[in-house]
Amino acid sequence: MADLKELIQSADWKTEKHVPAIDAPEKAKKGIATKIVISVGKEIAHPNTTEHHIRWIEVYFLAAGEKFAIQLGKFDFTSHGEAAQGPNTSTIFTLPEVVVAFKTDKAGTILASSYCNIHGLWQSSKAIGVE
Ligand code: FE2
């Protein structure tokens, strides 16, 4: 029997185009919104065609010492060139990049997952402090 966590792949986002890149400051300021950017294909572009594309990104925050992660957002990318004239004809493509603003008084870890419609699930994480 398969286990979902065994199907979520991980790698360095600089060498593997499916891994979400997390751009975040080293430290969040307590009580003030921190903006982070999550993107797929930052270093090596991922294909974005009707047949092959990134469907979604999810972003979580795990506060230090906590057992459960908090979901910060889930983002669907729903335009990949499809149109009435056929695949890859619309010229309209959603890019797999999102900005998330959140507040925390606790240090922790930002976790991101992404889903490629033909290469499955991927993840990455980045620690963030507070000041
Ligand atoms: Fe892919």
Image (cartoon, rainbow, N blue to C red):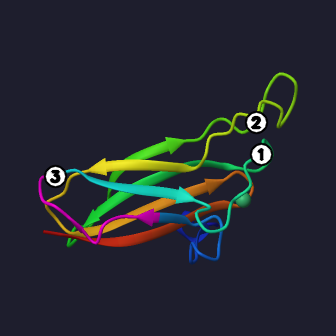
Q: Residue at the location (58% across, 77% down)?
A: 11
Q: What label does residue 81 carry, if any?
A: 2
Dividing the picture into quadrants, the one containing residue 109 is: bottom left
Per the model, the C-alpha gap separating discs 1 and 2 is 6 Å
Q: Are marks 1 and 2 in contact (CB under 8 Å)?
A: yes
Disc 1 marks which residue?
A: 49
**SS at circle 2:** loop
Disc 3 marks which residue?
A: 32
- Relative to 12, does residue 78 appear above or below in the rendering? above
Dividing the picture into quadrants, the one containing residue 131 is: bottom left
- The response on whether ligand 1 sits within 8 Å of label 3 is no
Q: Quadrant of ligand 1?
A: bottom right
Q: Which residues are magenta?
A: 22-31
Identify residue type, mark 1.
Answer: Thr
Disc nearer the start of the sequence (3/2): 3
| In this picture, residue 108 sits left or right of residue 39 | left
